[in-house]
Image (tube, coloured by chain):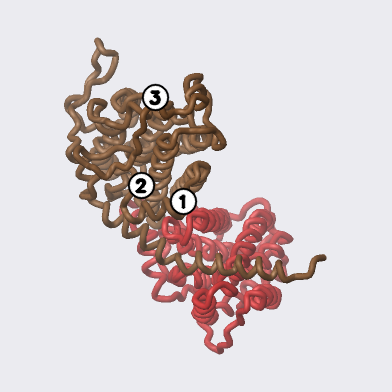
Amino acid sequence: MTELSASSGHLSDSAHADKSVYALRLGDDALIYAQRLAEWIASAPQLEEDVALGNIALDQLGQARSLLRYAGAVEGAGRDEDALAYFRDERDFLNAQIFELARGDFGFTIARMLVVSAYQWELYSRLQASTDETLAAVAAKAVKEVDYHRDHATQWTLRLGDGTDESHARMLAGLDLLWPYVPELFETDELVTTLATDGIAVDPAALEAPTLAYVDAVLTEATLTRPVTEVRHTGGRRGLHTEQMGFLLAEMQHLARSDPGARW
Amino acid sequence: MYGSDFTPPGDTSDDTPRIEATDLDAQFQAIIDSDGKIEPRDAMPEAYRKGLIRQIAQHAHSEIIGMQPEGNWISRAPSLCRKAILMAKVQDEAGHGLYLYAAAETLGADRADLLDLLHSGRQKYSSIFNYPTLTWADMGAIGWLVDGAAIVNQVPLCRCSYGPYARAMVRVCKEESFHQRQGFEILNTLSHGTTAQHAMAQDAVNRWWWPSLMMFGPPDDASPNSAQSMAWGIKRFSNDDLRQRFVDMTVPQAEALGLRLPDPGLRWNEERGHHDFSPIDFTELFEVIKGNGPCNKSRMEHRRGAHEEGAWVREAAAAYADKAAARAAEAPAA
């Protein structure tokens, strides 16, 4: 870390590295989630949902691009959004595992969207106040988008939970599959607590209660209940992923890597 | 994109109703004669209504089937910018499908019924989507050639006699025009990129050129539905005229791209003021329309699969709506 951007020259080298990693974590969350959501385009239960899921995926991809660009700029090693998305290997991706889990059925998709959008809404609402101008600006734009995602997930949770016996059962199955991956969203470590103390980042631990309060309220209205499990899967923030991640990356990256140096 | 509103020779499955001109309502004919717009509440001959429903539905079906060949490359797009553009483009096509089905509904059709006709094979979609997208360059070739051909076909529809269809087409054409430019831009980047990229672009153009020319349908002397469509102000130009317009428009663009169009007979004819091109092998078009193209089966299987897999979701939404309505009815008046 030798090149510091002029606007934040007061930060130490290690603080810069930390900020880059933080942006990368959030950027990877959005990128991998966009990749999964986009799998629905041309496969959704109805045409309106092809459009809606496409919109949500596009929002996430837009957030990912802003965050990855910023991570690369702060890192100062000349990596742009594509270098970060296409030329890192699996162990260097820092997304939480919940985002990479296979697309699943529409029940799982909505269960994940409910939790993730509630989490992202709480996150970006607070990150708007970051002392880092770029993160604050990305968050200010993202919170408006995520607000819509959360509403979409809420409306569908009500319909699936309180729809038919089958849809109710599928929502429960989706929540069961999802739940061991939820706590990872709220994990904290030294990197993020330090950045949070400096007012740059949001401590994920602070997001757990409000996120789950929102989710619980929706589930209750939808006649569903939150699964009870002690199982926790984690490791994404340290580059440890599920087996599903390798296939996602292989598909996403193969063309860009087939002709390195080419411009597309 | 657009619907192939034509059938192979000898195909008797064509259900286009034909009626005598004497049945036409005078008021309807007056609007047609004055080049006005027929609106949903206007009287119209049953054959006009049914023919339009079929045409608009097949156009809508083409849009949603057309999501598949391009959706095929979203996960593999070689940059995040290209990924975002492609996602937006495929999403546009879903949007086109939505407002075209809505236009058909103004004629008394129901979207669910129209989808059943697609899924049971009784209504068709544009045969161009039965070709596979094998490389990234196909995203460029589809945008440039397929969307380009669609625009040539569809711009006249913005003036078609049925108001809701004409108005839907104004928006569709604006978006298709953007799609065509992005396709051109993909090919331009590839053509001037690495040797492998240039070869990829040329290969895609080689594969998509002739199918794109076939999008305009059979030659005029073998196009049985055209005359009535022309008389009713639905169709404005003949298949061959539109095809010629597309060829004339595309040749200089290919030169700008530095890519060759795969037709040794393609040359400027000073006397005609148009480009001559080699005869088209329409047996291939009719084979594809009959269901024997490379992807007919997989496109329909995917579409039916998505629809069937989504049935429980649609049922849940309907059940919830019923429950909500019942709860509202039971609630004491405020």
Mark 3 crowdedness (10 Å alpha carbons): few <14, some 14-19, many ≥20: few
Which residue is rendered at x = 28% and y = 50% of the image? B132
Q: Is residue B23 visible?
A: yes
Q: Secondary structure at mark 1?
A: helix
* Chain letter, colour red in render: A
Which residue is rendered at x = 26% and y = 13% of the image? B272
Which residue is rendered at x = 38% and y = 59% of the image? A253
Q: Secondary structure at mark 2?
A: loop
Cβ atoms at labels 1 and 3 below 8 Å apart: no
State the CA–CA distance, disc 1 to disc 3: 39 Å
- Which color was chain B given? brown
Question: Do badges 3 and 2 share one subunit?
Answer: no
Quarter of the rendering containing residue B268: top left
Residue occupied by mark 2: A262
Residue occupied by mark 3: B231
On the image, the x and y values in percent for residue B61 come to: 39, 47
Furthest-top residue in view? B271
Mark 1 crowdedness (10 Å alpha carbons): few <14, some 14-19, many ≥20: many
The reply, left or right, for residue B305 in relation to residue A150 is: left
